[in-house]
Image (tube, rainbow, N blue to C red):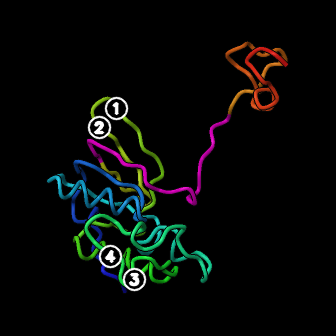
């Protein structure tokens, strides 16, 4: 059981509108949520997984950040231990949970965002389970490891316009318009 239990989800308690919705409770989502909350905004962090930490809990055991602890910490809270060491996956996972608890961040776990649409005044988010949330602002912090949706793009024309150069041609071209 985590501090972010789904037994009494925020959305079921009637909270349907917030200032800012943050999608993702990994490093970026937690840091954004903390900054927004510190600025006095009503924020809700939506996490598709069953716990905070983004992809960290599911990575391989020996993974460490690319940067030492002093450069991997989030605003307002140091990573435990020496600042020049590289924390383990489990240490980062624990740190992210502790960060969310320390700053009392409103994280709603098991809350997958299926769609977000802007109507000119607010974002309307459709969540799994039939829930809907409205937010004046939206932070997309789902990370590079999240399931991405790629748009269907038209096929490149056989004779491209100069402003519509296929990537393979652009990579081979030393200057625009010359092959």
Distance between mark 3 and mark 1 Cα atoms: 48 Å
Q: Is residue 141 magenta?
A: yes
Residue under the point 63% across and 43% down: 150
Which part of the image, by quadrant, shows the N terminus?
Answer: bottom left
Q: Secondary structure at mark 2?
A: loop
Distance between mark 2 and mark 1 Cα atoms: 6 Å
> Of residues 18 and 26, which is closer to you in this image?
26
In this view, 79 is above or below 106 = below
Distance between mark 3 and mark 4 Cα atoms: 29 Å
Residue under the point 38% across and 48% down: 125
Pointers 2 and 1 in contact (CB under 8 A)? Answer: yes
Q: Secondary structure at mark 3?
A: loop
| Residue 109 sits in quarter | bottom left
Crowd band around label 1 with a 10 angstrom C-alpha radius: few (<14), some (14–19), many (20+): few
Residue 60 x/y as whole percent? 62, 78
Outermost residue, front side: 84
Identify the residue position indicated by label 3 in the image.
82
In this view, 154 is above or below 129 = above
Q: Main secondary structure of the magenta part?
A: loop
Pointers 3 and 4 in contact (CB under 8 A)? Answer: no
Distance between mark 1 and mark 4 Cα atoms: 31 Å
Q: Is residue 68 magenta?
A: no
> Of residues 116 and 99, which is closer to you in this image?
99
Distance between mark 2 and mark 3 Cα atoms: 44 Å
Magenta range: 134-152
Residue under the point 27% across and 74% down: 8
Q: Secondary structure at mark 4?
A: loop
Identify the residue position indicated by label 4 in the image.
4
* Sequence order check, earlier mark of 2 and 4: 4
Outermost residue, left side: 40
Identify the residue position indicated by label 1 in the image.
119
């Amino acid at each position: 059981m985590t501090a972010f239990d789904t037994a009494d989800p925020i959305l079921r308690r009637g909270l349907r509108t917030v200032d800012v919705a943050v999608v993702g409770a990994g490093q970026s989502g937690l840091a954004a949520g903390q900054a927004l909350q510190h600025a006095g905004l009503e924020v809700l962090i939506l996490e598709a997984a069953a716990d905070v930490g983004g992809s960290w809990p599911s990575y391989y055991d020996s993974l460490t950040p690319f940067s030492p602890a002093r450069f991997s910490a989030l605003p307002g809270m140091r990573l435990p231990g020496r600042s020049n060491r590289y924390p383990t996956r489990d240490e980062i996972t624990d740190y992210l949970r502790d960060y969310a608890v320390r700053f009392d961040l409103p994280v709603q776990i098991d809350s997958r965002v299926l769609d977000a649409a802007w109507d000119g005044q607010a974002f309307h988010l459709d969540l799994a389970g039939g829930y809907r949330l409205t937010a004046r602002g939206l932070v997309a912090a789902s990370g590079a490891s999240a399931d991405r949706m790629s748009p269907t793009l038209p096929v490149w024309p056989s004779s491209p316009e100069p402003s519509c150069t296929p990537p393979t041609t652009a990579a081979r071209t030393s200057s625009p318009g010359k092959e």
